[in-house]
Amino acid sequence: MFNDTIAAISTPLAAGAVSIIRLSGDEAISIANKIFSRDLQKQTSHTIAHGFIQEDGTPIDEVLVSVFKAPKSYTCEDVVEINAHGGPFITRKILELTLKAGARLAKPGEFTQRAFLNGRIDLSQAEAVEQMVEASNTAQAKSAITQIRGSVSRILEPMIERLLNIIASIEVNIDYPEYDDVEVMTHENLLPEAKVLLNEVNQLLALSKRSQQLNQGIETVIVGKPNVGKSSLLNSLLDEEKAIVTDIPGTTRDIVEGQIQVGSVVLRLSDTAGIRESEDLVEQIGIRKSQSLLERAQLVLLVLDGSRPLEAEDRELLDATQNSNRIILVNKQDLKTEIEFDETLEYIPVSAANHDLSKLIDELERRFEIMDTPYEQSLGSERQIGLLENARNDIMRAIEAMEAEIEPDLIEIDLKEGHRHLKEILGEVHQDDLLEALFSNFCLGK
Ligand code: GDP
Ligand code: ZN
């Protein structure tokens, strides 16, 4: 498909590390051969040769060279990977030698692009390769690796098939209305099928959005009146001095943020100034900000001071967060307990200043454990979710049209659009599939 051979350094350029120079294309082996001390043409696929990279006959680095012959390689082309030891300077030198020997410098992502265009991976897998590289937490990495393994096409294939069958039924009726052995398309027949499909798509959407959420992290706010230990809690959780801890009530006006990973879940934490009446304008802004944060929050950590009796402000916050997904923390466990609950509230004792948060961590792990692995059953990018939403809307429109007993050709337009959107997720849009499904599922030729 491509007639040039590309080369690039596939590892970060850092001193001391092993680095890999990768080549892909028809000439990959012959180019590498020109600069290697041994004959790579004789090398069996998927084996490693030990030798030297040479410049004008002079060895410049001792290397291991892996050969992957087409089509069983990352790109479906001949691929050569040179494992070099010589540090950034030598690595660049080797790349230069491959370019001199006839390779072209690869553009970013070009190896993966070739893998996609040569049909080895679909678009969702190509996307996942990038996400894998950019992953900054295990949730993201997990989601990427399941996608790379082809989970998205496995999820979508049955839905696409179901949709094609509905389209095929409609088409048969439009094209061959006189055939009496063709199952007569009625709204009663197709409507249930379409509803099953809609249901599947909706479930997939819900799961995908949830795993996206896990991927991006759970928006978590820490609230509590001044001086209960919010900043200390955040600090202790983040284990760094990002929030300023002070003894003067109401001094944390700015929302301070950070991320922590609990199990496979990332919490995006924000500390807020206390939510309370205030004369101070600056403080008011902080308070308004925290109120809107509270509304957006997916998890609220409400901090109470265990060394002092419950106050009106605490009660207000208990009320305000009643319907939130919240965890009540009673802080300063190291001090004498003065707090008393008039209600039977479930709470978790902690001591932020002493980094004693194990009960909180346990609770977080328990809460998010069940949310752990929807990745295998979900899509993994905004692009994919957006297209799935489009497909869902197409199917919904088709269902409405069926219910209104509108002309089949008009219903078909929406369904075909839905089909196109589903296929686009995988990066392929083929009208041929429609024909294939039509003829494999219906015996018209008898
Ligand atoms: P915030 O206003 O809610 O952010 O509270 P801070 O984190 O600034 O803490 C207020 C005061 O309480 C500081 O003097 C902290 O050192 C103290 N403090 C916080 N957590 C604890 C704790 O677990 N035990 C004790 N004894 N003091 C704490
Ligand atoms: Zn604070």
Image (tube, rainbow, N blue to C red):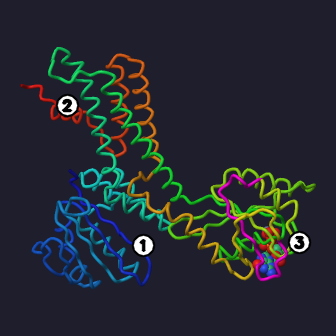
Residue closest to the far left: 446
Which tag is nearer the camera, tag 2 or tag 1?
A: 2
Mark linked to residue 248: 3
The magenta stretch spans which residues? 320-339
Question: What residue is drawn where x is 31% and y is 50%?
Answer: 153
Camera sees residue 254: no
How busy is the neighbourhood of tag 1: few (under 14 within 10 Å), some, or many (20 plus)?
A: few
Q: Is residue 405 above or below residue 104?
A: above
Q: Position of residue 368 (x, y in %)?
A: 54, 64
Task: First in sequence, mark 1 or 3: give its number.
Answer: 1
* SS category of the residue bearing label 1: loop
Which tag is nearer the camera, tag 3 or tag 2?
A: 2
Question: What residue is drawn where x is 35% and y is 51%?
Answer: 152
Name the residue type under label 3.
Ile
Q: Nearer the viewer, residue 175 or 8?
A: 175
280 relative to 129 in the view: left or right: right
Query: Which quadrant does the C terminus fall into?
Result: top left
Name the residue type under label 2.
Leu
